[in-house]
Amino acid sequence: EMQYFHLDNKKQNVAISFIKELEKDSYGILNGEFNNTFFGLYDEADNLLTEIKVDENGAGKYVGQLDEGKYYINELQTEEGYILSDLKYNFEVQYDNSGRENIEIVVNDGDAIVNEFVKGKIIINKKREK
């Protein structure tokens, strides 16, 4: 006799958010705005699920459905003049049957994800004229 099992992988409505910050110079001036900063949302098998564009205030947000499991965001592109971060910001999605519309997931414990300036050196060789 054949037995059939139906495994239901529950999707969870999530609202994932994070804050992005660009390093300021010594005068407190930003070297530009958020125009081209993108993060990737990945599952634990390193599959890119979607890209998240950071808004003009440095806020990144994804609202959608994810399976239970482990995920991470990783910076794909940052503003010109800044160092691209290779850090992975991990989080976990667990099924929540409380009836809330979305479970809120705040990445990096709410701390800003900061990009530093690309720093260069200027070397001046001074030669004495004869």
Image (cartoon, rainbow, N blue to C red):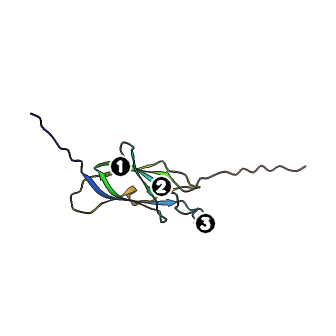
How crowded is the residue under tag 1: few (<14 C-alpha within 10 Å), some, or many (20+)?
many
Mark 1 vs mark 2: which is more N-terminal?
2
How far separated are the C-alphas under marks 1 and 3? Answer: 37 Å
Give the numbered dot on residue 62. Answer: none
The image position of residue 78, as x and y in percent, is 52, 54
- Mark 1 is on which residue type? Tyr
Q: Secondary structure at mark 2?
A: strand
How far separated are the C-alphas under marks 1 and 2? Answer: 16 Å
Whether residue 85 sits left or right of residue 106 in the image: it is: right
- Mark 3 is on which residue type? Tyr
- Residues 57 and 126: in front is 57
Mark 2 vs mark 3: which is more N-terminal?
3
Whether residue 65 sits left or right of residue 52 in the image: it is: left
Q: Quadrant of the N terminus?
A: top left
**Number of the front mark, 1 or 2:** 2
Give the numbered dot on residue 27. Answer: 3
Q: Residue most toward the left?
A: 1
Whether residue 81 sits left or right of residue 97 in the image: it is: right
Q: Residue most toward the right?
A: 130
State the residue position of label 1. Answer: 71
The image position of residue 40, as x and y in percent, is 43, 51
State the residue position of label 2. Answer: 38
